[in-house]
Image (cartoon, helix red, strand yellow):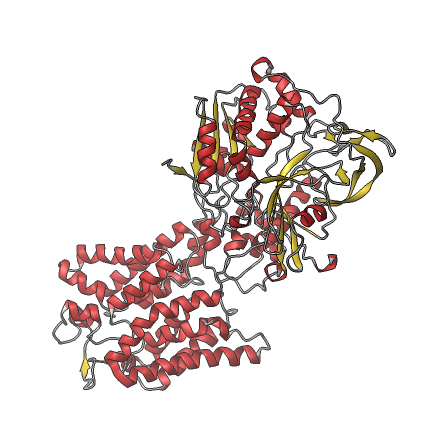
Amino acid sequence: MENKLIASSSPHIRSDETISRIMLDVIIALLPATLASIYFFRFNALKLIVLSVLSAVITEAIFQKARKKPVTINDLSAVVTGLLLAFNIPSSAPWWIPVIGSAFAIAIVKQFFGGLGHNFMNPALAARAMLLASWPTIMTEWVTPGADAVSTATPLAILKGQAEGILPSLTDMLMGNMGGSLGETSAILLIIGGIYLLYRGVINWRIPFTYIGTVAVIMLAFGGGIQNTMYHLLSGGLMLGAFFMATDYASSPVTKKGQIIFGIGAGLLTSVIRLKGGYPEGVSYSILLMNVAAPLIDKYTGPKVFGEVKQNA
Amino acid sequence: MNLKSFTFKGGIHPPHYKRYSEKAEIEKAEEPKVVIIPMQQHIGAPCEPIVKVGDKVKIGQKIGEAKAFVSAPIHSSISGIVKKISSMNTPTGSGVMCVTIESDELNEIHENVMSKGDIEKLTKEEIINIIKEAGITGQGGASFPTHVKLSPPPDKKIDTVILNGAECEPFLTADHRLMLEQPEKVVYGLKALMKAVGVNKGYIGIENNKPDAIKAMVKAAEKESNIEVVSLVAKYPQGDEKRLINAVTGRVVPSGGLPMDVGVIVNNVGTASAIANAIQTGMPLVERVVTVTGSAINTPKNLLVKIGTPFKDIIAQCGGYKETPGKIIMGGPMMGLAQFTDEVPVIKGTSGVLILNEKEARIPEPDPCIRCGKCVDICPVNLQPLFISQLSLKGQYDDTQKYHVLDCIECGSCSFICPSKRPLLQSIRVAKREVLAKRKKS
């Protein structure tokens, strides 16, 4: 019997949590918004989402097979990336946009840098930035929800005076009945998903709350009143970005203070881009910029070790 | 009963697993036929055997003499004949000198074992000496000689004694049952400790997942105006000295410092009860309460076991193995020591014998770190385990000092919480050893 006993070092028990469970939670949290986008943008949305997820998973499998590494598509992280990328694509986009985007996100941004946990940027956002730079017209062609999809402008473009149009009602914005990328239109469903992630402990309040809070405060001060502030909070990718993108583990700080700085920084950048920049929307770029700063933030926000103060005093 | 519960920052909530044994009253274990008593059961210098093969010994007779200051003498737990003095496997290591005694089943008590009188009449020095001579060491697991704790350098003013009844390790219920069944003894021991260091304030900290024990202790301490029972949030590692002091008094023990640096001495409730025994009956530390529990044992129990009884014997008294054991742990699942055999003896620091089945014992395959930051969130010392572990795994031990590797208390919370099942504590431990070894050399 003796030689069967395992004599490893403590601790001898582990929590039930696993990577795939965390990823599954994110997928569950994204589900309401996914269904809503299919409801609003019909078959085209479904097609783009399926293509995006499939190409993300297949790219990961091919890449790992080619490098003779264990294939880890079961951890569901590629599914999450694919889904998030689809959320960032307009419903009118052709089929190859999500395919190229997902392949780029997984192969270049994730796997080239060492795979899961080593991506220095959020893969879905980096892919979106690439698509936006390469096919700007396709990536900014918005249509109204529903079967008779016609061209429209996003509320932020209207706010900014870059496009003609009538602002949708705040209720429509909350529900997602407006022009925009697939998954970013329904603020309320994204918030519900975010609350689920908070409840499950997958994310904590620090990044999303400081992010949204910073945008709210700046827009109240400089954005032209309460009504405009509401438009700024509910439109664009703010909710999606704050709850699902900025909180990406690998590309955001791990320290408590760092996460707060990260959230405030992303909020500042988003507000500045929206108010002063050339683009009507600033969530993607501000998160990407903060991603690059994350290691530096981590470096300077290491927590004070228990009992450290007294000793130095 | 509505006591406010106190705690510290950070920590984890592992499942308690206490239901296995928390309702089991402390039972006297069967008299062992043979005991194997190691000459080193505590942190500090080993003892030298003062008996020879063939000697007849009685219960409570000193068989190992402590030569160094940080050491505690060792006594026989049974009466019988010394059969062997040789190096054997013990729960804390192999090749430890052990005295093997075969019982004569007469249960003769040594003539030196007699009541030492009442606390009121004893002086500080006398109490400390009784504790020293009784070979009392911390019963929480680490086994530091208690009399050493009670002799702080004169520049350290002690004003508080805290009894640790947190028992935050999952599975363990020995302290819980002790507080429930013999609260007066615990209070008596605390009073002795307070007198020994000349303080006026005593606390007993108990996690709020043991409301019955809190109730019993409050009742037992009713008449003592300077003893307070403190309810603590059930959270791991609440029973760690520095976390406990922080929760009870709000004081922060400096990094690298000891409880006495903030005027506190912490002892386990089991230690207090052993002190009460030593004063009231004169019996040195020759037995202790051990929780025998886990998924692979038939009838989990809390047993009063003679020091030196082989694990095998007490496992047999708990109905033996229910299924093939995968891991035998001395202590709790978070900080306990895995054993490679069940033939090692119970020692003074054996708070539990935990048997996990093969499935639970399996070491999980680690996945890549996803930087979820959970280990940073929960570290009770505010370390960043992921970075230290990363450096350690790369062999960059020197760099781990920038991340305060030596402050790690090895509670294992980081490894527990990690969704990627990374060997965080295990690798941090390696870095600690390397850093310390290097310091010693230079």
Is residue B320 or residue B112 the one in the foreground? B320
Residue B383: x and y in percent read: 50, 47
Q: Position of residue B206 (x, y in %)?
A: 47, 37
Relative to residue B319, is residue B163 depicted above or below?
Answer: above
The residue depicted at 34 percent of the width and 82 percent of the height is A48
The answer to whether residue B128 is above or below residue B397 is above
User: Where is residue A147 shown, x and y percent of the image?
Assistant: 20, 85
* Residue at the (36%, 72%) spot, across then down: A84
Seen in the image, is B26 located left or right of residue A46?
A: right
B94 or B217: nearer the viewer:
B217
Q: Quadrant of the N terminus of chain A?
A: bottom right
Nearer to me, A197 or B33: B33
Most extreme residue toward the left is: A166
> Could you say where residue A288 lies in the image, as x and y percent from the top left?
37, 65
Image point 35% across, 52% down: which residue? A260
Which residue occupies the extreme right position in the image? B54
Q: Is residue B287 above or below residue B372?
A: above
Q: Residue furthest front?
A: B106
**Quarter holding residue A183:** bottom left
The part of the image, by quadrant, that contains residue B436 is top right
Asked if residue B142 can be seen in this view, the reply is no
Is A119 situated left or right of B30 in this image? left
Whether residue A32 is visible to the viewer of this picture, yes or no, is yes
How many badges with numbers are in the image? Answer: 0
